[in-house]
Amino acid sequence: MRARKMRYYADMTKSAIITVLIVVMVIVIVGVDVSFFRNHFWERLMANVGIVLVFIAFYLRFLK
């Protein structure tokens, strides 16, 4: 019973961390778009892809 409860809390913690990571990623992408690349479509697209790749690398390195 106790092991199941601990696993539940570990899963909830991981879900919370992933949710926070996604929210931070969205905030960073919107902030960069508004601040630097307002009228530059291709540069904006490349920067957004780069930001997403950095967040994926961070997730795979530290949270997986």
Image: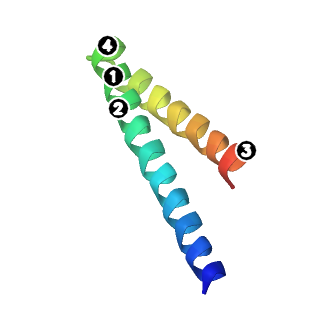
Q: Which mark is residue 35?
A: 4
Q: Residues within 10 Å of mark 1 (few under 14, many from 20)?
A: few
Q: Which residue is mark 3?
A: 61
Q: What x and y, as percent, mark residue 62?
A: 70, 44
Task: Name the residue that disc number 2 marks.
Answer: 27
Give the Cα separation between the discs numbered 1 and 3: 24 Å
Q: CA distance from mark 2 to mark 1?
A: 6 Å
For the residues bearing labels 1 and 4, Cβ distance under 8 angstroms: yes
Measured as percent of width and height from the top left, residue 4 is found at 60, 82
Number of other residues with Cα within 10 Å of mark 4, as a class: few under 14, some 14 to 19, many 20 or more: few
Secondary-structure class at tag 1: helix
Q: Mark 2 or mark 3, which is nearer the start of the sequence?
A: 2
Image position of 36 with respect to 62: above or below: above
Nearer-N-terminus badge (1/3): 1
- Tag 2–tag 1 contact (CB < 8 Å): yes
Residue 14: x %, y % from top left: 55, 58
The kind of secondary structure element at disc 4 is: helix
Residue beneath disc 1: 31
Residue drawn at x 48%, y 43% as measured from the top left: 21
Residues under numbered marks 3 and 4 in contact, where contact means CB atoms less than 8 Å apart? no
| CA distance separating discs 1 and 4 | 6 Å
Mark 2 or mark 4, which is nearer to you?
Answer: 2
